[in-house]
Amino acid sequence: MKKAAALLLVFSLVFCLFSCSADGNNGFTTELTEKLAQTVSSTLENTTDEDQSFYTGFCQTEPNDTSNIYATQNHNHEGLSGTPTVAAVTAADFGFKMLRNTLNQQTNALISPVSIISALGMTANGAKGKTLEEMESVLGTSVETLNKNFHADRFSGDGVNTANSIWFKNAAKNDLTLNDTFVNTVQDAYGAEWYGKKFDKSTVGDINRWVSQHTDGMINNMLSEIPPEAVIYLINTVMFDAEWEYPYSTSDVHENRVFTAENGKEQKVTMLTHRTNTWMKFGLGKAQGIVKRYKNGYSLAAILPLEGVSINAALASFTGNDFVKAVTPTAIDPTCGTGLYPVDVSLPKFETECKFRLSDTLIGMGMPTAFSAKEADFSGIGKSHIGNIFIGEVYHNTYIKLDELGTKAGAATAVEAAATGIAEEPFGLTTMEFNRPFIYVIYETDSGTPLFMGTVREF
C-alpha cells in the first residue's frame, strides 16, 4: 500500500500540472500523461495482490478504447476520501437490478434501494429454508450481513432520516402469535417500532400517518386498505432533504430549454447550468456521469448514456459494484476517465412520484417461494391460526423534487405478510447537457451507498 500512497502523491502533482497548463503546452501535457501511464503500468506489475486490488477493476471502457488514457484523477480532494462498504455494494447491486426490472412500470422510475432492502431484510429474519435462500440470493447477501449494515441509525442525521416499524394483527381471536426471537432480532438490528392493531380502517389511517410523519409529508397514502388475510406489515421509510454544496444562482436557471424524450418528442424544461473546475466526471459502461455534492455528505450522480445508447442498454452495461467503484474515490487508474474537470453541465429541474407493487418483480428476480401461500416458510415470524404465512405484496412509494436549491426525496416500503390455507466520446469534453433521457443516483459520498436511484425519460 506504500506504492498506493506514492501514486496518490504523483497524481495530485499531475492534476496540478494539468490545471496550471490549461492555457497551452498540450504537447508537454500529453507527453507527461503517457509517461505517467507507463509508470503506473510498471508499478502495477511489481505490486502485491493486495496492492493490485487497490488499483484494478475501476474502468468501464472497452479493452481497446484509449480515448480516456490522458485523463487524470485526484481522489484525495475534500469530501471524497471514503471507501466502498458492504452496504454500498449490496444496495447498489440490488438497486440497479431492481431499477432495470421496474423501468417500464413508470415513465420516470424512482426507487430507494435502502428502503426496499431494509423492509425485506426485516422480513427475511423470519424466513427459513428455501424461502430464506431465495431472499438472500436476490438481496445479494446473508440476513446476518443485512442486520449489521442496515440499522435505521446508519442512514440518519443531517437531512437524512430512516425509520422502521412493524404492525401486527392483534385481534381478540389472536390471529398472530409472534416469535420472541424474531421480535428481539428486528428490534435490535433495525430499531423497529412495534404496533399491535385490529387491522381495521383505523389502522390504515394509523399506518399512513406514521409513514407521512417519517417522510416529511412526501408519502401520504401508503395503503388504501388492509385485506382480511393480512396479519403483519413490515415498513421502512427514507427521507432526504439537502441543499447543494454549491447552489445555483438566478443566472444559472434557464427556462424553455429543449429536452428530447425517449419517444423523440421535444419538450420545454428548466435547465440548471453551472460551470466549475470541480465537477467530478466518470465513465460507467456505456454511459458517462458527473457528481454534484450536497452539504450533508451525500452526492448526486447524473449518468448520461452515450449517444445512440438507450436507458435500458446503459443500465445493462454496468453493475452496482461498478457504480460504487466509479464514484467512490479509493483507486488510481489513469485510463478510467474519472477526475476533476472544467465542465459546463446542464441538468433539468424535475419532480417525480412513483407507486410500485413489487411482488411480480421480486418473483421474476428469483424469490417466488416467499410469495407462495403453500410453500413459503416464515415460521420464524410466528404462527397464525388462519394458516401459513407468506408475503402477499410489497408496496414501494417514492417521491423526489430536484431544483436550484437542492433535493428533497422520500420513500416508503411495506411488506404485507398474509396468512391463508391456499460508440464512446472522449472525457475531455467541456460540456455535458442532460437534455435527453438519463439516470440519477443520490448516494452517500464517502461509501457510495445509494439512497435513491431513478430515471428521467420525459417531462
Image (cartoon, rainbow, N blue to C red):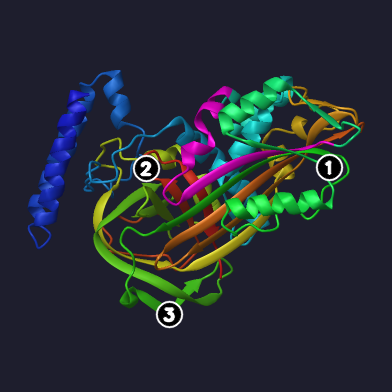
> Label 2 is placed on what type of residue?
Ala
Q: Is the C-beta separation of discs 1 and 3 under 8 Å?
A: no
The magenta segment: 144-170
Q: CA distance from mark 3 to mark 2?
A: 32 Å
Q: Secondary structure at mark 3?
A: strand
- Residue 246 figure quarter: bottom left
Residue that numbered label 2 is attached to:
326
Q: Residues within 10 Å of mark 3 (few under 14, many from 20)?
A: few
Q: Position of residue 426 (x, y in %)?
A: 30, 55
Residue 159 falls inside the magenta stretch: yes
Q: Nearer the viewer, mark 1 or mark 2?
A: 1
Residue that numbered label 1 is attached to:
198
> Label 1 is placed on what type of residue?
Lys
- Locate the N terminus by quadrant: top left
Q: Nearer the viewer, mark 3 or mark 2?
A: 3
Q: Does residue 199 lie above or below 4 as drawn?
A: below
Left/right placement of residue 316 relative to residue 164 reads left
